[in-house]
Amino acid sequence: MDPVTVADVRAEPLSRRLLTAEIWVVFAVSLGASGVQALLQLIASLTRPKALSHQKALIVGSYAPGRPWIDLTFQLFGIASALAPVALVAYLLARSGESLKTLGVDRRRPLQDLLRGAALAAVVGGTGLAFYLAAYYSGANLAVVPAQLPAVWWRIPVLLLSAAQNGILEEVIVAGYLLHRLSQLEWSPGRALTLSAVLRGSYHLYQGFGGFAGNLIMGLLFGVLYRRWGRAMPLIVAHTLIDAVTFVGYTLLHGHVSWLP
């Protein structure tokens, strides 16, 4: 019997049942589980005697206060492990004869992706800040603390890496992968965009109702742009820039401006 070579292997189209199971598995070990956890955190916040606006939601915090090298190790491990679902998606795409390039995650159009991402970040970032402040002062949101790290040399680099991790994880999984697979399942564009946006909002529920609503709207916009551009890279750039400005800006401005909770 002749040995089987790589060239002899042909990826067969996945059945609807396998595609559906694959989606469930990916989100069970990633942002779907985060959505359930965020819902439980919101319920816990709502059942406390304090109003939502008197509670805080920390995003990037210290794991080992007073022990900077151990803290740094935890930070880097957390960032790396959070990207494991992206590796899983890359593997699953390869199993079906595709790749991350199928989702537009590549370096074919760096300048275009950067310009589109920067423009999108400017629009969404400014609007998002206004929306958050309105939600917070209306009592529908917790006081979000984007970053609370010790003032050591690695604080800003870790915040930038955390921003990139968020951008890569969310846009590859929720925008690119999910919409691509739902298209293969022949979902209607509107139905697929709605699910993607609701999922994006769900894992921000720990911030309050404003966090959910704001990210749901962002999810609809990013989903429409992903379908139009056929690329997740501009969305990754935009998300990374938004989070980088949020994390670093909060770190530098908190306690120095009156309007920031």
Image (tube, rainbow, N blue to C red):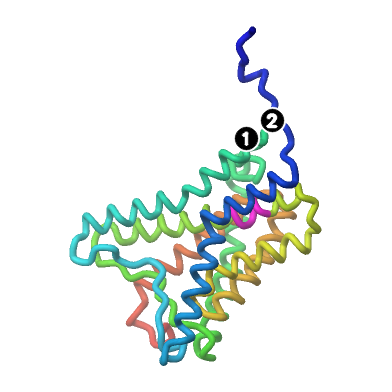
Q: Does 169 appear above or below 144?
A: above
Query: Residue 116: x percent and y percent?
Result: 63, 56
Q: Residues within 10 Å of mark 1 (few under 14, many from 20)?
A: some
Residue 66 sits inside the magenta stretch? no
Q: Does 52 appear above or below 23?
A: below
Kindly state the secondary structure of the residue where label 1 is placed.
helix
Quadrant of image for the C terminus: bottom left
Amino acid at pointer 1: Arg
Q: Earlier in the sequence, mark 1 or mark 2?
A: 2
Amino acid at pointer 2: Ala
Quadrant of image for the N terminus: top right
Q: Does 218 appear above or below 189?
A: below
Q: Residue furthest top?
A: 1
Number of numbered tags placed on the structure image = 2
The answer to whether the residue labelled 1 contacts the one labelled 2, judged by CB atoms less than 8 Å apart, is yes
Q: Is residue 21 visible?
A: yes
The residue located at (47%, 47%) in the rendering is 84
The residue located at (28%, 57%) in the rendering is 154
Disc marking residue 11: 2
Query: Which is the main secondary structure of the residues drawn in magenta?
Result: helix
Query: Residue 207: x percent and y percent?
Result: 49, 76
The CA distance from mark 1 to mark 2 is: 7 Å
Pick the front one: 254 or 177:
177
Disc marking residue 95: 1
Q: Residues within 10 Å of mark 2 (few under 14, many from 20)?
A: few
The stretch of residues the image draws in magenta is 173-178
Residue 175 sits inside the magenta stretch? yes
Q: Is residue 237 visible?
A: no
The quadrant in which residue 61 appears is: bottom left
Q: Does 187 appear above or below 254?
A: above
